[in-house]
Image (tube, rainbow, N blue to C red):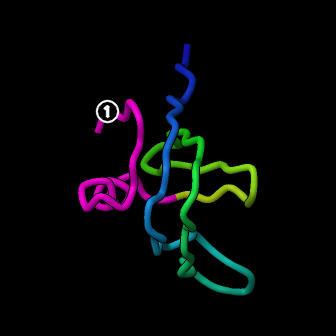
Amino acid sequence: MASAPRKYSARILRPIPYDAPGGPGAEGATRQVAPVGSYDVAETGEHLQFFSEDGDPFQMRRSHALEHKRAGHLHIEDWES
């Protein structure tokens, strides 16, 4: 029996640049910016998926999110890193 993905509450305190997979007519990743705001976060393998009321969901590599958490740009409640 597979366990459900863990979910967290998060706040991005400074805009975070990240590489989004794919993109219209592009190979590989495209550079995006995650805006300041409150998010619900779910684990999706080695990525975290961010959901907000105002925008489309986006995914960020877990290791990249951890770097921004350490730098103080991202706050995730109850995150076991």
Point out residue 34 in the picture as x, y percentages from the top left corner: 55, 67
Give the magenta-colored segment's residue range.
60-81
User: 36 and 1: which one is in front?
Assistant: 36
Placement of 76 over or under 30, stated as above or below: above
Point out residue 22 in the picture as x, y percentages from the top left corner: 63, 74
Relative side of 66 to 15, left or right: left
**Amino acid under label 1?**
Glu
Magenta residue check for 4: no
Asked where in the image residue 71 lies, by quadrant, the reply is bottom left
Placement of 53 over or under 35, stated as above or below: above
Instruction: Please name the residue that numbered disc 1 is placed on.
Output: 80
Point out residue 4 in the picture as x, y percentages from the top left corner: 57, 23
Magenta residue check for 62: yes
Quarter that holds the C terminus = top left
Point out residue 73 in the picture as x, y percentages from the top left corner: 36, 61
Q: Check disc 1 and report its element: helix, strand or loop.
A: loop
